[in-house]
Amino acid sequence: MHRDRGSEGESQTTGRVPSAPQRAHIPDGGRRRFLGAAGGVAAIAAAGLPSLAVVGGATRAHAGEAASGDAHLAFRNHAFVVRSAVADADFAVAIAPHPVNGDEQKYPNLIGSDTRGLPHDERGEVDRAAFDAALRAYTSGDPADFEAIPLGGKRKQLNPIGSLAVNLTGCIGPQFAIPPAPQLDSATRASEAVELYWQSLLRDVPLSELTNDTKNKGVLAAVDELNKLAAFEGPRKDGGITPETLFRGTALYVDAADPSGRTGRYVTPPGTLTGPYISQFLPKDAPYGSQLIPAHPHRRSRDRFPHQLR
């Protein structure tokens, strides 16, 4: 038999951190001491993450241990206590409501649902059996069910089980609230379609034309039409759409005042209207951590980047 080391939460004979069920029975364990100093799980959950004062207190709790014993062992134990407290705080975040917009029930032919990659008939309507097979797979999470989803061509689905992966840090997807998308027959959805059509019509217009002194007739016509759509949720400046705010984005967030999660509000993220409009396909490699995302030469053009290709 071995004896628990109390605040270290380890076996004196094995030096291993106990499993979760074993930790639950450790008297005066490191996690209990840490959570007690923080005022309990509720205090940590309310803060979202352990405060610097709490983490500092845990460090001081192990200072004597480090001075009299193995400093590396003490630091490992301290890391375990902090990580456990953060995991408890993440777990305490409730599952957010996930309301739907009703399109799947309203349209039996599923024209308001995402059916990409599935078989469709000559009218462009999805095969119902294939759609149901996809629903079964997303409900069960069984890889065999995903393999059984009929495909509409040779192209496979792109990372269909990505949403089922377990994050090793932070909350999981269902803990984040997402308001329902605008309904297919709503004025907001129609106005978004108008913007997309204008983006297609103006795809060859140099980005340098998206300025308030532009003489481009297409840009001015797009601005004029979008300003007439009261339901359009694109970013505005000085009360309206301008050539310099054209095609810039807003984000739809859940209204915290509505516990059902059904009410969304559109927000213009900071920096969205700052500076000139630029393409996401810049002709330079983009750093991403220790790697570089290479530019795509076939996406470069004089129309899109006249100032970079002189």
Image (spheres, grey):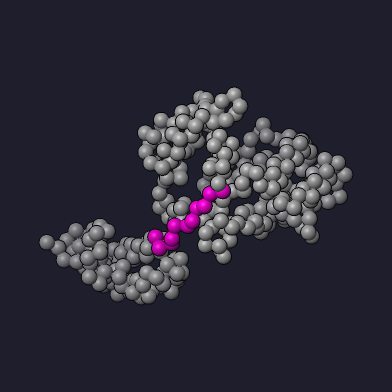
Principal SS element in the magenta part? loop
- Please tell me in which quadrant of the rendered image residue 24 appears: bottom left
Rendered-image quadrant of the C terminus: top right
Residue 70 in the figure: left or right of residue 154: left
Q: Would you say residue 100 sits in the magenta stretch?
A: yes
Residue 191 in the figure: left or right of residue 23: right
Rendered-image quadrant of the N terminus: bottom left
Q: Is residue 109 shown above or below 93?
A: above
Residue 46 appears at what percent x and percent y? 45, 69
**Of 55 and 270, the residue lying toward us:** 270
* Total marks in image: 0
Q: Is residue 106 shown above or below 57?
A: above
Which residue shows up at 22% across the image and 70% down it?
27
Which residue shows up at 29% across the image and 63% down it?
73
- Would residue 204 be visible to someone looking at this image? yes
Which residue shows up at 61% across the image and 27% down it?
123
Residue 294 in the figure: left or right of residue 300: left
Q: Which residues are magenta?
A: 91-101
Q: Residue furthest left?
A: 1
Residue 169 appears at what percent x and percent y? 43, 55
Residue 66 appears at what percent x and percent y? 30, 70
Q: Would you say residue 248 sits in the magenta stretch?
A: no
Residue 39 appears at what percent x and percent y? 37, 75
**Of 86 and 290, the residue lying toward us:** 86
- Would residue 69 be visible to someone looking at this image? no
Which residue shows up at 49% across the image and 28% down it?
151
Q: Is residue 249 shown above or below 301?
A: below
**Of 115 and 184, the residue lying toward us:** 184
